[in-house]
Image (spheres, helix red, strand yellow):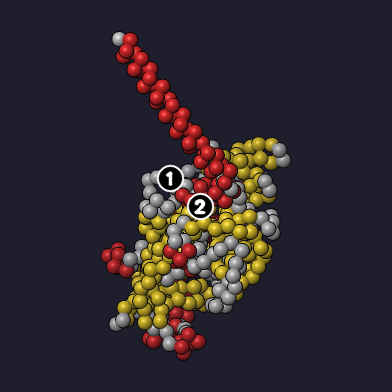
Amino acid sequence: MRTKSIASVRYVLIGLVFLAGYAEAASPSTTSQVARRTPVVDVFEATRDAVVNIGATRIIERRSAFDDLFFNWYGRGRTRKYTLTSVGSGFIIHPHGYVVTNAHVVANAADQKVVFADETEYPAKRVAVDEQHDLAILKIESDQAFHAIHLGRSHNLMIGETVVAIGNPLGYQHTVTAGIISATERELQTKQNVIYKDLIQTDTSINPGNSGGPLLNVLSELIGINTAIRGDAQNIGFAIPVDTLRKLLPELLSIGHHRRLAVGIQLSWREPKLVVEASGPAAKAGIEAGDELIRFDGKPVTQDIDFYVHLLEMKPDHELQLDLRRKGQHYTARFRPEVIPMPDGKELLSRKFGLQVRLLKPAEARRLDIRGGLYVTDVERGSPADQVGVERGMVVIQMGNYFPTDFDGVGAILEKVRRGEEVFFRFFAFTRLGIDVLGGPLVAR
């Protein structure tokens, strides 16, 4: 018995010596990693799961040199199309699957997919594309909540402060680069003569494929969306300020049109407060402009995007409860949104542009790999649509920043369009060579 006990003690001691030796061997490495850790490492580890790669299958136009100079609606007969899969970057801005990227990443795309760092993939649908500001919102569906990047502010950026970019340059997934802010309020004119204003200039290494990815500060907050580089220079990249994204979010998410519910709340920042601009039902409930929003339906307010998504997913008969602060005093306002009568989208298309359409049938939409659209059944002679060459048999796939799938949505888009205003349309046109994608403005009459 005694021998067995001694053996057991020796076994334990040998094990302790081994563990001590292992700890001694591992300790220098751990210490080294702590010493080598930088803010860039922290930013990457905090945000990598919210950054995505975007693969877009698109229709590419091939035109002659003459068409490059004078391309318009009538040039489609000299245009050949072929498909190409391109890559870009994006990031999650809300756990419910809302993704931000550049408009040019998904422009003309027949479909797009989102790929995470762990290589899981999701098909993505387009919620809105704003080509004027080069921003797009996508939506992916899942039962799980996604990791989202916290939206920062860009109004108080400091020249020389450290910034981090994460993206998919040249197909190298989840590449991280770092640099500084070189300047703010820059302008950039593209080859399409589009001028982007108030851009952030950075020397952070940005390459094709980084477009749509996040530009982050050392607190892991989003301060910009990487959008362009100067091809004739080195270390000159540009990003859209996050404040521009914040300002456009209600429009991009269709807050004013969703289910035709009028709430009357617009959010804006007055550091460090999130204040409201009130109208309609909110104003009738006693809410005043400048009141600070503290909670909505019992949920603390940390991001304006959280409130907007809550409105999108709210049921029409829901009573909204807002906790607010005015001049240091807390109060609660309760009200229901007002239902706005839906205008006749089919009638508006006919009256303003001379287009007679029907909804695309589900089987037709599946064959075209789109969620829906409007099939042109007739074009009024001499109408705005006729003047630019729209023909019977084409399919409307985009109007303004949105993608029509029903007449209610069409009505919501067109109801505020006045005579002489331009609305961007994108069509599928069917030829012997395949499908052409045509886009341009129609002037409302």
- Residue lying at 46% horizontally and 29% vertically, measured from the top left: 20
Whether residue 166 is visible = yes
So how many labels did they put on this image?
Answer: 2
Instruction: Find out whether the residues at labels 2 and 1 contact each other: C-beta distance under 8 Å.
Output: no
User: In the structure shown, which secondary structural element does the residue marked by tag 2 occupy?
Assistant: strand
Considering depth in this image, is 330 or 200 the residue closer to the camera? 200
Question: Residue 155: where, in percent of width, then height?
Answer: 67, 56
Quarter of the view holding residue 114: bottom left
Considering depth in this image, is 376 or 150 the residue closer to the camera? 150
Residue reaching furthest right? 327
Structural crowding at the residue carrying mark 1, measured as other residues with C-alpha within 10 Å and reported as few (<14), some (14–19) or many (≥20)? few
Question: Residue 328: where, in percent of width, then height?
Answer: 71, 38
Question: Residue 116: where, in percent of width, then height?
Answer: 42, 53
Distance between the alpha carbons at the discs numbered 2 and 1? 12 Å
Left/right placement of residue 403 relative to residue 293 reads left
Q: Report the amino acid beneath label 2.
A: Ile
Which residue, given by chain and number where applicable, does mark 2 sit on? 93
Quadrant in which the N terminus is drawn: top left
Which residue, given by chain and number where applicable, does mark 1 sit on? 145
Question: Residue 270: where, in percent of width, then height?
Answer: 68, 49
Q: Would you place residue 437 above or below residue 306 in this image?
A: below
